[in-house]
Image (cartoon, grey):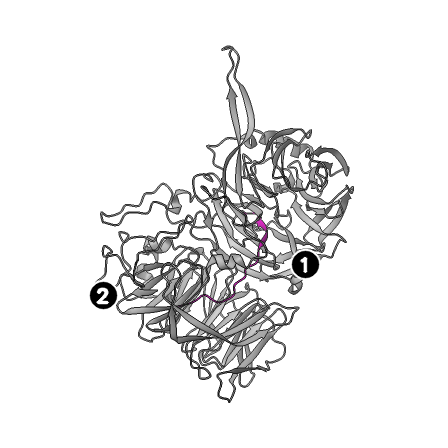
Amino acid sequence: MILDFDAMLKVHRIRSIDWNPSPIVALATSADGSQVAAAREDDSLEIWLVSPGSVGWHCLLTIQGDPDSRDPSSKMSSLVWCQTELRAGSLGRLFSSSVDGTISEWDLFNLRKKKILDTIGTSIWQMAAEPFIDSQLKPKKEQKAHQNGDAFPSGTGNVDEEDHSEGDQDDDKENEILLDGQRDDQCARLACACNDGCVKIYNISDDEGLTYQRTLPRVSGRTLSVSWSHSWNRIYSGSSDGFIRCWDVVLGHEVFRIDAGHKGEHCIWSLVALRCGTVVSGDSSGRVQFWDGRVGTLLQAHSYHKGDVKALVASPNHDRVFSSGSDGQVILYKFSNEAVASTDTQVTPNVTKRWIYISSKPAHTHDVRALTIAVPISHEDLPHEEKVKRKRGSAKPLDFSYHKWAHLGVPMLISGGEDTKLFAYPVREFAKFSQHDICPAPQRLPMQLVIKTPIFPGPLLLVQSPQWLDIYCVNLKNPAKSSSPGPSGWSANTNLVAHVECKASQKIICSTISSCGTLFAYSDQIKPNLFELKRIKSGKLSLTVNKKKLPQGLPFAHFMLFSSDSSRLVLAGHDRRIYVIDVGSGQVHNFAPCRKANCENLPPSEPPITKMFASHDDQWLAAINCFGDIYIFNLETLRQHWFISRLDGASVTAAGFAPKNGNILVVCTSSNQLFALDVEAKQMGEWSMRNTYSLPRRYQEFPGEVIGLSFQPSSTSSSVFVYSPRAMCLIDFDLPVGGENDPDPDPDTSNNNKSISKMQTNGVLKRKHQEVETKKGGRKNFDFFAFRDPVLFVGHLSEKSLLVVDRPWKKVVNNFEFQPVDKHIYGT
């Protein structure tokens, strides 16, 4: 596509990069309900900040798991995020189980996975954490999201008080049970459903990790699912023999069993126990059944799924239950009190309590393995009730706004599955609004562009995969017009010039390439590695890769970059120190990021650094931790210069130093705010003082999570492209910000992907004549442009050309191991 700026900006597209994201196998919600953990099949873990709508979802951090995750026996099978009494942090403790029978804890501060229980001799299918009750004694009305599927967290949240339900009516009875059955120990407990037919119970100890408590009697078949009752003294388990069993945890014997009604192997994949005493099951026949958890009788059954039911989850007040399965559907069932009229006018109408089918969402193309519910507590700049006053004009307001269902404290449903996608739904208005695609580009491949290099005639593109690095030469001499539908532009050709693999037992965590393209480096989970690219002296344009030595004792890194002159390599070590290595002499200097002055000699105490950016004059280094704090270092004096606490209370999604002024650091946050910081003066830049909190609403509702910035490679340019996988926005710091009467972008809130503020005419995209223009060259600031396919990278090739790396999602799906669910199309 060619974007119609003051002068034409030529956009080159690369669509040939292999991109194979890994399926979601489990989800879990933090104890405070504000974050969601997503476990993938490749043993990596993502932590997502929950948003109250379609804007503001942010992947806080990614942790690589065991390097031997390619072994099927080491893959994660379940995830649970629980809160303990002694360590009552807001997030709780995150555990995962594996097929090989091990249990690990994820350290979110040091970004590592620690095995706390060696193999128990059999596979673990599921884990369930005991519901956390404050001090185990207080009869409080806890609004916990208790769920069962591939994850079993207990997230809290406010409940819509207008919707009274069975769960609310039975709170008093439940609290009486808690008081009568209180136990002496204060340790939370973890129940594991094992392949040998047993349920093993462990105490979660702050000092000793997991300590074994007891094993419930073995049953025929495999135990596939497990759920705690809210009276803590009972556990429900589901097996491959088609039985649901109720266990007395204190006595260790079976109270009763429920026959699911099928002979032969009939798998109970998922269970969830509600506060009212009802137990919900999902099985391999596609049925969702509601049982009386006290005596085991069937209350109701639904058969809306066309395949195995893989996951169940209940809303915080337990009046709604969601199910998902191998047919790609997410289905809502709601508790209903119906009054049945009587012919006798003197008789009070009978009240019938039943669970009714409400709606389904075929959001996923493959199996939906996991469900969880979270409660957003992030900042929202505009209350739901407040109406935005717009000036009269030709542009119509959007038909959809995320504020229609964006309420702080209102629960959100999240689903994940084999199509690698994460979708979010409003729990209370599930049937009213479409699902939101949280990550249009799951497991996006890190990339870096080298515009000019002395060893090759064209630009170089570094692409990082989990097990290897590829360096491509981008051929721009004879670009071909793309024949794909929609705005496409020019297709750039790529040639692979270098390929480096890490050891089979390791994973690549981060990588970088120098601005001249002659050096590149990566870090696995053992140590950093440095390489040199050299051109072979022959008639052919070919390169050779030589490994260079680095000083001994360097830790592996979470992030790395080269200085602009390629003379220094900067590492953000896993020991929470920053290392500056002189590539020529091998000299090493290290920083310990700190919040106060004159504390650089103290042991590291800050969270790990996950992002770094260097100014073009190599004076400043901005290091950003996983929670959004920024540390500014002076690379000339090798000392910390400034500390900036979380801007707007949000995490940093992208940043970079402006080429026009190396003292200005541009920062984008997860709350869709934009800051320009004067690092030399240790203050907000002049632009931010005027405009940061008055940005156009179209930017605050940026479609998708911002993942990068691209500055024009010119010392006189004042503009930057801010981009997400779904759209990019052109911002010029020399132009006025603009008013709220300008047309807004149309976020892709449904399956329809609409272009933003543009029309296509013979490959040239022109802005609509009705748009409001500024006086400078007719250019409009904060101009948006939509992407048709998920975008992985955007970078300037020159002042007048842009490189966009994307991939049609259909091609990504075609590379999956399993075929999409066969869905009937109406009329065929």
Look at the image and say whether residue 21 sits in the magenta stretch: yes
Which residue position is annotated with label 1? 72
Q: Quadrant of residue 764?
A: bottom left
Residue 532 relative to residue 772: left or right: right
Q: Quadrant of residue 700?
A: bottom left
Q: Which residue is painted at 50% across and 30% down in the image?
A: 164
Tag 1: residue type?
Answer: Pro
Q: Is residue 735 above or below residue 739?
A: below
In this rendered view, identify the residue nearer to me: 701 or 94.
701
Q: Which residue is painted at 39% across and 75% down in the image?
A: 476
Q: Which residue is painted at 38% across and 52% down in the image?
A: 747
In this rendered view, identify the residue nearer to me: 540 or 191.
540
Residue 314 relative to residue 238: left or right: left
The spot of residue 349 in percent (x, y) is: 52, 17
Q: Is residue 509 above or below residue 400?
A: below
Could you give the CA–CA distance between mark 2 and mark 1, rounded to whole angstroms? 60 Å
In this rendered view, identify the residue nearer to me: 481 or 190.
481
The spot of residue 812 in percent (x, y) is: 51, 59
Residue 690 relative to residue 148: left or right: left
Q: Secondary structure at mark 1?
A: helix
Tag 2: residue type?
Answer: Lys
Q: Quadrant of residue 277?
A: top right
Dominant SS of magenta comes to loop
Which residue position is annotated with label 2? 776
Looking at the rendering, the stretch of residues picked out in magenta corresponds to 13-32
Q: Which mark is residue 459?
A: none
Look at the image and say whether residue 246 sits in the magenta stretch: no
The spot of residue 529 in percent (x, y) is: 58, 76
Q: Is residue 197 above or below residue 419?
A: above
The spot of residue 73 in percent (x, y) is: 70, 58
